[in-house]
Image (cartoon, helix red, strand yellow):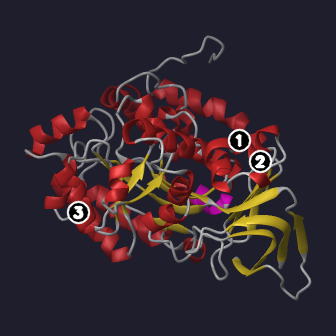
Amino acid sequence: MLTRIRNTTAVTMNASRDIVSPTDLWIEDRKIVAIGPYGHRPDRVIDGTDMVAIPGLVQPHIHLCQTLFRGLADDLSLLDWLEQRIWPLEAALDEDAMRVSAQLGIAELLAGGTTTILDMGSVNHTEHILNTMLQMGIRGYSGKCLMDRPNKFLMQSKDDAMQESYDLAHRWHGQDQGRVRYAPAPRFTLSASDALFEEARSLADAFHTVLHTHGAETRDEITEGIKLHRRPPVAHLFDLQILAPSAVIAHGVWMNADEENMVATSNAKLVHCPSSNLKLGSGFAPTVRWRQKGLIFGIAADGAPCNNLLDGFQEMRTAALLAKPVFGPTYLSAPEVFAHATIEGARVLGLEDEIGSLEVGKQADIVLLNFRGPHHQLWDMTPIYSQLVYQTHASDVYLTMVAGQILYENGRYTTLNLDEVKRTAREALLRVLRRAEMEPLSSWMTT
């Protein structure tokens, strides 16, 4: 099927950062086949008048398993947030609850213009996240969360965890022409042993995939990491030879200068999660310094219980604003931030040759933004990147396409019955709360 998006403004994010307007985008066999004139008759025409076409946003740190817990773990520090709420809730998930949680998260991401994610699953039931990604059409990686250090809620022996991880990787990695991939996910150095990290790195190497973890998120993590390993977490991962071009570390807020140099030397990747860092009181990632050192990083929302949104546009705006009081108003400009949410996010995942920009031959992961609202008036007379970073809302998304398939258009999903999912979500959450021996936190929510 040949699709034409006509008369749009294309923010390409190619090497020259070309902005083409007005133009047409042509999509066939999952890929962009032309930008501009193309002497063929389309099977479908989408009117892009007063719309801006962008590459789909890339969020390289998401927790789909936690979407069901939105609003249930607010106003806590990270370690309390994990031990008092998130870990017992994750441990109480059943298969159906995991599926519903993933569906709700992916629905929000697609409606907000995110087309690619790196997701961290939980210790159990991660196959239902991968299957939901496959069915709903989003692009990305997910992987079983690996935790073998003693704790009260989520723990599995190293051997069992790795056997299940290899089984999942064999089953899921590369599904649908590589749209769905597997990524091993040792949670962080306080909950995963050195041996588990090393075996996860071996799995990532064997499958040519990424290794997904957290690091240097809070001061408490640094303190506990030094007690456990006599060095801070990212330095410890470097000494274990875990850091590599395939390693993706979420947060990195409290890395010291030496650790930043270790990330640069190893060509490991980072993910900036500004709203999550603010809400958990974790701190401010020094993104301008990261850029000055040549560190590659993306921007992501993290999980719904520590954000509480999965809105990539809000994360861009927050990332831009956070940098300015520390480094000055000219730093982390709108064009730079938008790059980190698209082509640089693709580079974090090793997918920059496939996605992250609108170019002929690349995957047709395209988002159309409706710029007819009052906050976008005279948009064609002002810098487009300022519009995208400082003014655009997730609700401005008109259409989201992945691999040439329209997944969301004008408020409707093509691969999900959202009303049905919403009906099942309430009972799923009640089951989880009962298993976790927690009460609903709202007086109107009854059993």
Residue contact at pointers 2 and 1, CB within 8 angstroms: yes
Of residues 119 and 346, the one nearer the viewer is 346
Q: Which residues are magenta?
A: 131-136
Alpha-carbon span between mark 2 and mark 1: 7 Å
Does the segment drawn in magenta span residue 132?
Answer: yes
**Residue 331 to residue 218: above or below:** below
Give the residue displayed 29% in from the left and 43% down from the top.
Answer: 155
Q: Nearer the viewer, mark 3 or mark 1?
A: 3
Of residues 27 and 138, the one nearer the viewer is 27
**Residue 373 to residue 441: above or below:** below
Give the residue displayed 66% in from the left and 50% down from the top.
Answer: 388
Give the residue displayed 68% in from the left and 48% down from the top.
Answer: 387
Which of the 4 quarters of the picture holds residue 241? bottom left
Q: Residues within 10 Å of mark 2 (few under 14, many from 20)?
A: few
Q: Which residue is mark 2?
A: 417
Q: Residues within 10 Å of mark 3 (few under 14, many from 20)?
A: many
**Residue 108 to residue 144: above or below:** above
